[in-house]
Amino acid sequence: MRYYFITGFTLFSVLQATSAMAQDAPNTLKEVVVTANPLGRSAEELTQPVTVLSGNELRDKAEPTLGETLSQELGIRSTYFGPNASRPVIRGLDGDQIQMLQNGLSNLDASATSVDHNVSIEPLSVERIEVVRGPAALLYGPKAVGGVVNVIDNRIPDARIPEKITGTVDGRYDSANDGRTGSLLLEGGSGDYAWHVNGFARRTDDLEIPGFARSERQRRTEPLDPGEEEAKNKLPNSQSNSHGGSVGVTKFFDAGHFGVALTDYNTDYGTVAEPDVTIGMDQQRIDFAGAFDDAPLPHVKAIKYKLGLSDYDHTEFEGAEPGTTFKNRGYDSRVEVVHEKLGLFEGAVGIQSEANDFSALGEEAFLPPTLTRMNSAFIFEEVPLGKLRLQIGGRVDDQKVSADSNSTFGPGSSRNDLTGSASTGFIYHPVPAYAVALSGSYTERAPNAQELYANGPHLATDAFEIGDPSLDVQRSVGLDLSFRKELGTVTGEVNFFYNRFQNFITAAATGAIDPTFDVPVYAYGSVPAEFYGAEAKADFTAYEQDNHKLGLEVRSDYVEARNRDTGEPLPRIAPLRIGGSTIYHYNQIGVRMDADYTFNQDRVAPFESPTDGYTMLNAGVDYTFNTGPSSSTLYLKATNLLDEEARDHVSFLKDIAPLAGRAVMIGVRNTF
């Protein structure tokens, strides 16, 4: 534990020592964060830590999955179910503890039901990704107890676009898996209309790895049958073929705007867990969004509304034969009313309604058909008090989960849960460029359909899952303390967090093996738990003169989670990580080198094995040049230069699926 306190204290001391520099720093345009606050505040004005990826930084960090795209950001790891499926893990929390959003609405896929299900989002097709770390339930529901990931792609333009076509074309090749990827973004406007088009296509082969697929520990303790060969240098069944796109249009009028978009996402990929199991996934989605910016109602500044409808299905194939088919038909809708300042209070109130009709059909279905409905109301208010800004909010959710009766799972059942959440916090600027933020929250989350009713084998994850219909509502309290320096030669942040769960819902290995399917048994249950840790990051401008700019970054994050009754660690908790980067720019040339060390994880849960640490060394260079009215960027990125055998402790597959070996990715991007 002392590692993260030392790291945090050291970094904050460096930030404090540069206060004089901040006074002379030029003002910069602050980026508005739309996820954490309905009033359009910048990250510097929010009580909770926020990460924003956009522009070239997002394109440079983009990976085939959302989890891997964000995995190097502060406080974030990835579930890494091979190179084709991963979700973000924030401060040790994942699954239904993290709210995944597309443009402020639920993702409406099946990625939260299992780690082998990919998130139906293509990182190269998005405009920006906002991550709010810590509880954000007051705006987006009880699933946000660990944080919110909001992917924004402007598929429904919310601002007028000049009457010309702008866009980006990107093509890249990755030697790690012979990956070929192309993406296209086009936007334009005409009179009172604006339109948006994006698309992508990707094809990959099996991933190259440094050595054996199975870990040394597993090769020693679980030898293969006679005649079987250990997979080496390639990760079997890790290929993929994906494509998709969106088209949207918006009509602007005097009082606001209204738009609609159609989206299609398709992917076929190997699951890695089994040599012959693949997934074919398809999602069609239609979204509506608009706003009244000049609402004819007293004390109302704006009314914003959104509706998303989704038709999602994927099939898990055993060889050429379909095994289990997952279907999810759902919608998510929300209305926010932003009011004018009333006395000291400025804020918004809103309602939200979501439904998911989910089914898993086939001989190995592990969940009965279920219908989940949730209706919610929320409020967010802000009070400026000089150098201090107070933020408060609350939310009520009414969830009903109904399971159908059938011959496999028996008679149907349903349950209704009314839950409430509240949050309060403040941010204080004692002097310019410095801020202290403190927030506290109480969150209730009703168990989802899988946690309640699962009872069967899931081949892709190689597990037999058992739910518990008697699970109580999950209750937790959280605290978040941040110290920030926002301007000057040195900027950065130090964050401390603590989450205490009365009954944390999780699937834990029982140690048993199902006799019919010969797979480990995982049972959903609840334990009193606590998660705590720290994050620290500092950026230094080491040299800036004559078009030369040299920057340095240091960072570290740590989380610990344990059962409060027994003191035992919870499973799949990432170890301490420290890292640094050197960034150099000269005219149109950019060079970057990153080094991150992930420590051993020896604090493991029952029936969980430890994981060795590893060093990840990456480097990149890019060159930007003008080509008439457009600009082009040639870029090259080398990853895992040390060719380390790296296994992610967060991953269910850490002992059979290491991260990629040494590889080079090269590409060209044209912006016009």
Image: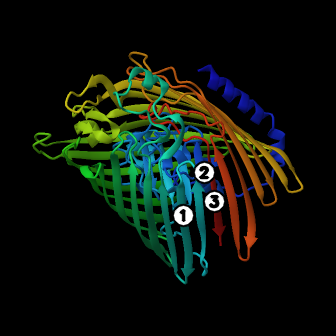
Q: Look at label 2 and name its amino acid.
A: Lys
Marks 1 and 2 sit apart, C-alpha to C-alpha, by 15 Å
**Residue 403 percent coordinates (x, y):** 18, 45
Looking at marks 3 and 1 on the same chain, the residue that comes earlier in the sequence is marked by 1
Q: Look at label 3 and name its amino acid.
A: Gly
Which residue was labeled with disc 1? 182
Residue at 42% x, 27% y is: 571
Residue at 34% x, 38% y is: 461
Q: Camera-side residue: 31 or 648?
A: 648
Which residue was labeled with disc 2? 61
Q: Quadrant of residue 530?
A: top left
- The C terminus lies in quadrant: bottom right
Marks 2 and 3 sit apart, C-alpha to C-alpha, by 13 Å
Marks 3 and 1 sit apart, C-alpha to C-alpha, by 10 Å
Q: Look at label 1 and name its amino acid.
A: Gly
Residue at 43% x, 33% y is: 230
- Residue 667: image tag: 3
Left-right relation of 112 to 636? left
- Residue 131: image tag: none
**Residue 328 percent coordinates (x, y):** 28, 54
Camera sees residue 615: yes
Q: Quadrant of residue 276?
A: top left
Judged from the image, the secondary structure of the residue bearing numbered disc 1 is strand
**Residue 331 percent coordinates (x, y):** 32, 59
Which numbered disc, 2 or 3, marks the residue closer to the eye? Answer: 3
